[in-house]
């Protein structure tokens, strides 16, 4: 593999080009993009940074946060508030994310999507209104532990941190999640199959992981 340093601004520009090209290839379909990474890698921020550049390229865009598709607290916290296995295995309502976002955006889908399902702070349904993403649009789903569970993404972007960087950059109140990311790295290994892998040990100096050039 080849590691290519890139500025944050150039990363957004190159991802925009890549996604716009892939969206053009869908014809009248829609492109479903997963932007995966721990909170310390800021996947929500990267997805949000892609919205305006894609729209400037003529692509309707919907950004959905996986954090707005959590299960109710009674289910999510059944094994305690800081159980890393529960966090790894079932905090995100993947069936709801599929039903309300990814399937409607998929082949033959209606394009009628729910931008959020659950308000975790209030622990109740978010009561968000449905929105319609036109054909040719892009839906960006951002969050942690999104890959390897069968969610139907057309393009996957994984923000990778070394184990040391993940521990260093994870907020103290979130360090209980670290064993979940250890499991994710060992059992799913998202950096081995994601379409785009970006190393973000230092967010000011990301680097793209690319196939090595032939000798």
Image (cartoon, helix red, strand yellow):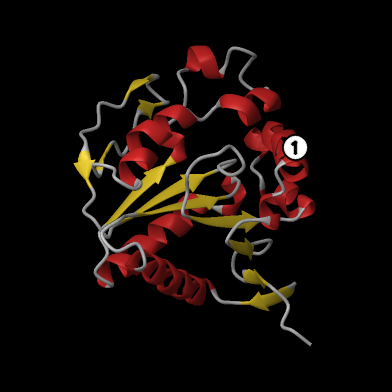
Q: Looking at the picture, does residue 95 appear above or below residue 134? A: above
Residue 151 position, x and y percent, is: 50, 40
Would residue 203 appear left or right of 58 to someone viewing this image? Answer: right
As drawn, which residue projects farthest toward the front?
108
- Residue ID at (65%, 77%): 5
Location of the C terminus (image quadrant): bottom right
Residue under label 1, please give it. Answer: 183
- Residue ID at (71%, 82%): 213
Q: Residues within 10 Å of mark 1 (few under 14, many from 20)?
A: some
Nearer to the camera, 176 or 108:
108
Residue 12 position, x and y percent, is: 46, 70
Question: Quadrant location of residue 195?
Answer: bottom right
Would residue 34 appear left or right of 40 to someone viewing this image? Answer: left
- Under circle 1, the secondary element is helix
Would residue 69 appear left or right of 134 to someone viewing this image? Answer: right
Question: Quadrant location of residue 7?
Answer: bottom right
Q: Looking at the picture, does residue 204 appear above or below residue 174? A: below
């Amino acid at each position: 593999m080849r590691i290519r340093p890139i500025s944050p601004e150039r990363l957004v520009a190159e991802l925009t080009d890549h996604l716009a090209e892939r969206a053009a290839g869908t014809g009248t379909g829609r492109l479903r993009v997963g932007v995966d990474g721990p909170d310390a890698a800021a996947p929500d921020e990267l997805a949000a940074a892609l919205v305006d550049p894609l729209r400037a390229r003529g692509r309707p865009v919907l950004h959905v946060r996986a954090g707005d598709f959590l299960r109710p607290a009674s289910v999510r916290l059944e094994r305690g508030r800081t159980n890393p296995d529960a966090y790894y295995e079932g905090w995100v309502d993947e069936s709801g994310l599929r039903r309300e976002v990814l399937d409607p955006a998929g082949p033959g889908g209606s394009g009628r999507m729910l931008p959020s399902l659950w308000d975790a702070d209030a622990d109740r349904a978010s009561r968000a209104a449905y929105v319609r993403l036109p054909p040719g649009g892009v839906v960006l789903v951002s969050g942690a532990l999104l890959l390897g569970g069968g969610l139907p993404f057309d393009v996957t972007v994984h923000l990778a941190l070394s184990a040391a960087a993940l521990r260093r950059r994870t907020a103290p109140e979130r360090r209980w999640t670290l064993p979940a990311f250890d499991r994710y790295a060992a059992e799913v290994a998202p950096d081995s199959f994601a379409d785009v892998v970006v190393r973000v040990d230092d967010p000011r100096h990301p680097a793209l992981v690319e196939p090595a050039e032939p000798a």
